Image (tube, helix red, strand yellow):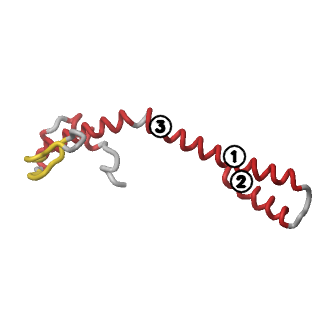
């Protein structure tokens, strides 16, 4: 990988520079190139992460929030809206109400990530 290559290259070149072996110019150029490759790689990773957050995750997150809001409103006697306008149960949880939900609603709630631990 890029990080392993950069560490090997930097260690080798700094070691050889400290021993004053060979020409200095190619070693400094390789150090600069290794550093720039690492910076570029980190930039690309950060950019891809931001773009995935921007274009891929909003719809699934919205769907999960809607499903959970519906679930909370249905399962509790008393619920309130939070700052994002989603229902959150306050008191009076009734587990038997789960079977009053439609099969699609039950599936959407049960498929919420992290709701089924391994």
> Dot 3: few (<14), some (14–19), or many (≥20) neighbours within 10 Å?
few
Quadrant in the picture for residue 24: bottom right
How far apart are the two marked residues, 3 and 2, measured between alpha carbons? 27 Å
| Residue where numbered disc 1 is placed | 37
Q: Given contact means CB atoms under 8 Å apart, are the residues at marks 3 and 2 in contact?
A: no
In the rendered structure, are the residues bearing label 2 and label 1 in contact, judged by CB atoms less than 8 Å apart? yes
The residue at 11%/44% (across/down) is: 97
State the CA–CA distance, disc 2 to disc 1. Answer: 8 Å
Question: Within 10 Å of the Cα at label 1, are there few (<14), some (14-19), or many (20+) other Cα atoms?
Answer: some
Pick out the residue farthest to the bottom.
19
Q: Is residue 29 above or below residue 21?
A: above
Residue drawn at the location 40% of the way across and 37% of the way down: 57
The percent position of residue 55, horizontal first and vertical second, equals 44, 32
The image position of residue 96, as x and y in percent, is 11, 48
Q: What element carries label 3?
A: helix
Q: Earlier in the sequence, mark 3 or mark 2?
A: 2
| Sequence order check, earlier mark of 3 and 1 | 1
In the displayed structure image, the side of residue 42 where residue 16 appears, left or right: right
Q: Is mark 2 on a helix, strand or loop?
A: helix
- Using the image, tell me which numbered label, if any, was put on residue 52: 3
Which type of secondary structure does the marked residue at label 1 adopt?
A: helix
The residue that mark 2 highlights is 6
In percent of width and height, residue 47 lies at: 54, 39
Q: Residues within 10 Å of mark 2 (few under 14, many from 20)?
A: some
Indicate the quadrant where residue 53 lies: top left
The answer to whether residue 114 is above or below residue 22 is above
Front: mark 3 or 1: 1
Quarter containing the C terminus:
bottom left
Q: Residue at x 75, y 47 (%)?
A: 33
Q: 95 or 28: nearer the eye?
A: 28
């Amino acid at each position: 990988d890029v990080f392993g290559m950069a560490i090997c290259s930097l260690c080798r070149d700094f070691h050889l520079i400290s021993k004053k072996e060979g020409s200095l110019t190619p070693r400094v150029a390789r150090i600069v190139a290794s550093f720039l490759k690492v910076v570029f790689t980190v930039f690309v990773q950060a950019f891809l992460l931001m773009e995935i957050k921007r274009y891929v995750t909003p719809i699934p997150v919205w769907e999960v929030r809607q499903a959970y809001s519906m679930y909370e409103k249905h399962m509790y006697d008393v619920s309130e809206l939070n700052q994002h306008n989603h229902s959150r149960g306050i008191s009076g949880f009734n587990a038997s109400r789960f079977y009053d939900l439609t099969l699609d609603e039950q599936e959407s709630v049960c498929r919420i990530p992290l709701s089924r631990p391994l």
